[in-house]
Image (cartoon, rainbow, N blue to C red):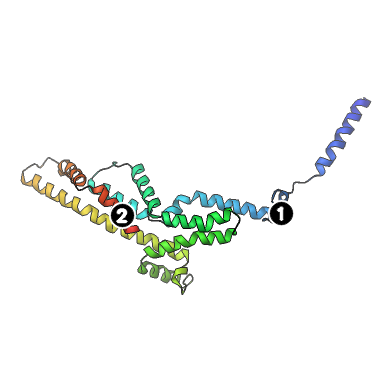
Amino acid sequence: MRRAVRAAVALLAASYPASAQTVDLNALIPAGGATASGRIIELVAILTVLSVAPGLLIMVTSFTRFIVALSFLRSGLGLQSAPANLVLISLSLFMTFFVMAPTFDRAWQDGLKPMMDNKISQQDALAAVIEPFREFMLAQVREKDMALFESLSKGRFETADRSKADLRLLIPAFMISELRRGFEIGFLIVLPFLVIDMIVATLTMSMGMMMLPPSVISLPVKILFFVLIDGWNLLIGSLVRSAS
């Protein structure tokens, strides 16, 4: 009995200092850094940015123009699933990386690399990363689209220096400019295929082949025409030059 009491007392004495201890989150953070709450907010912000990274890539690059033009090409050819969506998206992504390579290099050299080397702060790194993309978008955006969002904002984001345009104005204006250019290029792509469809339909009607769908004949003709003129080379070259 005495042994059991002694064992219980020893266990209570050993557990008392542990129960009195508290967990200090600030002890897990290096001296001179942010507070625990600030670090948690930073981690949440980083995870949020990573989750919307594909959307950011679409918003501030020429990806929109490329994918719209390639979608018009597939529609003009009359193909439902060839090339597949995965092929078109992958091609658009690599074209985007090719066109945006100088911008990505500047963002890395001026912003990300110095921050990783602890040469500049996170705020300075963010400004340095944004600046190359701002210059790219300003070179591509239409003045009319910028004026539209400036009028819609009622002067809240308007600045005298256009080179320092607020991203809340610049990004939507840049996106609708890219959509417009994508549709313009798409119209030029579809136009010759539409002419082929009209010629084939006229020929089949004049020959009395009422029951034969014109698309059965026009589809191989359009594919042959596109291959003979080396369409992929012409189209991709034109798209890249239009965004450079």
Residue situated furthest left in the rendering: 207
Disc 1 target residue: 31
Quadrant where the N terminus is found in the figure: top right
Q: Are marks 2 and 1 in contact (CB under 8 Å)?
A: no
Where residue 81 sits: x, y (%)? Answer: 29, 41
Circle 2 packing at 10 Å, graded few (<14), some (14-19), many (20+), is some
Under mark 1, the amino acid is Ala
Q: Is residue 67 left or right of residue 53?
A: left
Rendered position, 229 above or below 32: above
Residue drawn at (41%, 62%) of the image? 137
Under mark 2, the amino acid is Leu
* Mark closer to the chain start, 2 or 1: 1
Separation (CA) of disc 2 from disc 1: 51 Å
Give the SS element for disc 1.
loop
Residue situated furthest bottom in the rendering: 160
Rendered position, 11 above or below 73: above
Q: Nearer the viewer, residue 61 or 199?
A: 61
Q: Is residue 131 left or right of residue 66?
A: right
Quadrant where the C terminus is found in the figure: bottom left
Residue situated furthest right in the rendering: 2
Using the rendered view, name the quadrant where residue 115 is placed: bottom right
Residue drawn at (51%, 49%) of the image? 50
Using the rendered view, name the quadrant where residue 20 is placed: top right
Residue drawn at (49%, 60%) of the image? 130
Rendered position, 186 above or below 146: above
Q: Nearer the viewer, residue 189 or 163?
A: 163
Where residue 99 sits: x, y (%)? Answer: 38, 54
Disc 2 target residue: 239
Where residue 57 sits: x, y (%)? Answer: 44, 53
Give the SS element for disc 2.
helix
